[in-house]
Image (cartoon, helix red, strand yellow):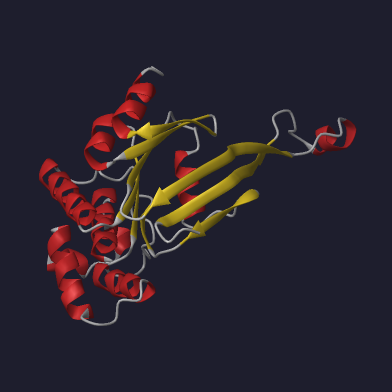
Amino acid sequence: MNNDVIIKVEGVSVSFWQNNVGVYSLKDLLIKRKSPFKSKRILNDINIEIRRGQSMGIVGRNGSGKSTLLRTIAGIIKPEKGTITVNGTFAPILALGAGLELELTGYENIAMLLALYGTSNGRNDAIKRISEFSELSDEVLRMPVKQYSSGMAARLAFSVSLANDSDILIIDEVLAVGDQGFQAKCMQTIYDIKRQGKTILFVSHFPDDVMKICDTAILLEDGFMTHHGPAGQICDNYRQLF
């Protein structure tokens, strides 16, 4: 793979098993000879090259496969077909509160996630930066995360991921956390990460955010990549779907 290419997605398809409508009992299974599950294709033959330092947006309607594509690139989901090659490290922000252990306190979660990210030098400084960025009080960070509101958990997970010095930042629909001031701070931090030459993959239903952050974008429809090009053009294609 070209050293300038940090992520290469080649012919990737992903299918999930789901309940088969019409199979409600053992009788249906034995007499009608219907399987209780059926396979549904979520991604179809996706091919992408993402260059180092590039910011790429992924847009599409609900159910188009955006989050599945991010999770497949991050290695959480194994593709049914095709290959994904990554030449760098990830900082994934894939869901509100993702990666947090509910029984642990905020501080314990920060320490655990930093260890998972491989952050050992200057860990105390990192914990301080994360707690300050999250704007969660010392009292809150000493509480078990199971007592947090969804917004508080999202702030914590987002702050830890942004503090991780990785090559690739993956963001999936999580910029709507907290108040407007916190959202603006998150956006500014993402701009700073972009200026540092990091690679960003960004999923959002808001074309304006995609255009602010991303250089290029792709449009997914029913698991197919239908458009790929400059972010502004792809966002216009996305708006035309409605």
Q: Position of residue 108 (x, y in %)?
A: 29, 74
Q: Position of residue 35 (x, y in %)?
A: 79, 38
Q: Quadrant of residue 139?
A: bottom left
Can residue 130 be seen in the rendering of this structure? yes
Q: In which quarter of the image is residue 33?
A: top right
- Is residue 35 toward the left or the right of residue 225 in the image? right
- Residue sitting at the far right: 31
- Is residue 37 toward the left or the right of residue 134 in the image? right
- Is residue 183 toward the left or the right of residue 117 in the image? left
**Residue at coordinates 63% horizontally, 37% vertically from top-left?**
41
Q: Where is residue 191 in the image (x, y as percent from the top left)?
A: 18, 49
- Is residue 226 toward the left or the right of residue 160 in the image? right
Q: Which quadrant of the figure contains the C terminus?
A: top left
- Residue sitting at the far bottom: 121
**Residue at coordinates 86% horizontally, 30% vertically from top-left?**
32
**Residue at coordinates 42% horizontally, 30% vertically from top-left?**
60
- Residue sitting at the far left: 181
Q: How many labels does the image show?
A: 0
Q: Is residue 190 above or below residue 206?
A: below
Is 38 or 223 nearer to us in this picture? 223
Can residue 139 be seen in the rendering of this structure? no
Q: In this view, does 6 lie above or below 128?
A: above
**Residue at coordinates 28% horizontally, 53% vertically from top-left?**
154
